[in-house]
Amino acid sequence: MKVNLDKMRLKLETEANLFFELEKIEDKIKFLLRFAILAPSTHNTQPWLFKVTDNSCLVFLNPKLKLKYADAKNRDIYISIGCAIENLLIAAQYYGLEGKVTYKDSEDNLVATISFSENIEKRELESLEKTILYRVNSRGPFTDEKIPDIFLEHLNQIFLENHAENDIQVHFIKEKNDVKKIAELTQLGMKIAHSNKDFRQEMSRWIVNNYTRRRDGMIGYSMNMPGPISLLVSKVVRFFNMGKIMGKLNYMSVSSAPLICVFTAPDLKTETWLKIGRLVERLTLELQKENFSTSIYLASVEMGDLYKEIQNILKTSSLPQFVFASGFMDKTFKTTPRHELEEKLLN
């Protein structure tokens, strides 16, 4: 998998060593937040806000960016913010800072406070710091190349050492019949979603063409759309039920994957979702570091009671919360843009 960086990431890559010229820890945290905002988010809404105070960073949810129909439980918005928190912690560790997370659930949309301290001798995760810049959510079919079992053992060890808490579990699905079943559920979920006119209208507002100057939303090229077609898709989705076509495309991609990762937990709590987001981001970065692509597909856990079928596949009573596919794609991807950090900082 080859990745072409957008201007924001290219600039950050060029300025990576400027961190060591900063003296105030407040300025260091703001520098690290440039990595945090590169995290994935549902519809690329970028639903995070930050407030930097002395040696800490307060992380907020932006309620204006909730998706009423695509994310009715608000699960994905918290998972997205969890991904941003993980990016921040990985970058901090690379640059010699330690971050301690305290999760919140307050009326003012504060979801976490991260306190930082100097730890100059502990510099790790260099390859992951670089991978954050190149991370993309890929779309399309996978090749036949398998992910080695020894690498999956490595991923499981990372889970056990860093994220095995709150009864969160990650399930690695490789058996082809089970992969096909999840592909079928994903296809059905897309049909259910697009049969809802309100869902289509909401989604259409976040689909943008390849020539846009917007810094958010799902850009056509991120969904393998040629430029001319990307100009039309938003209106087509808004006024026509494309569920059958979208479902078939999703089925083709998911069914070709050598690996499906399903994340489960027994409850529907904001802290659990934030922790799942951290785990999702860490594992996708580990996979992409090794040149494997990752593709997020949530229809099978978001639509109706389809999640119960995944419970049957996994033989668990725990609730499926998040799904991504992984494998090798022999193609080039372009990263999607982000709002400038200054637009995400609170005074």
Image: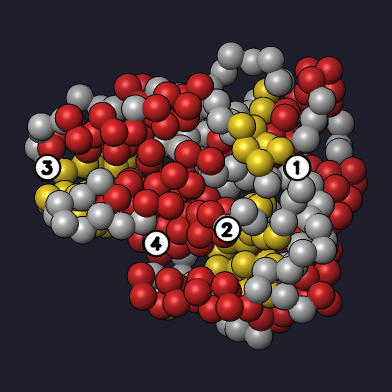
Q: What residue type is labelled 1?
A: Lys
Provide the residue designation for mark 1: 331
Sooner in the amino-acid sequence: mark 3 or mark 2: 3
Q: How far apart are marks 3 and 2 (CA)?
A: 34 Å
Q: Earlier in the sequence, mark 2 or mark 4?
A: 4
Horizontally, residue 317 falls left or right of residue 55, namely right
Q: Position of residue 40 (x, y in %)?
A: 52, 43
Do we see residue 73 in this rendering?
A: no
Q: Distance between the residues labelled 3 and 4?
A: 22 Å
Q: Say which element carries label 1.
A: loop
User: What numbered label is drawn on residue 290?
Assistant: 2
**Mark carried by residue 55:** 3
Residue 64 placement (x, y as % from top left): 45, 31
Q: How far apart are marks 1 and 2 (CA)?
A: 15 Å
Distance from Cα at disc 2 to Cα at disc 4: 23 Å
Circle nearer the N terminus (3, 1): 3
Q: What residue type is labelled 3?
A: Asn
Q: In front of the other: label 2 or label 4?
A: 2
The disc, 1 or 2, on the residue closer to the chain's N-terminal end is 2
For the image, the number of numbered tags is 4
Q: Residue 275 has which mark? A: 4
Q: Distance between the residues labelled 4 and 1?
A: 31 Å
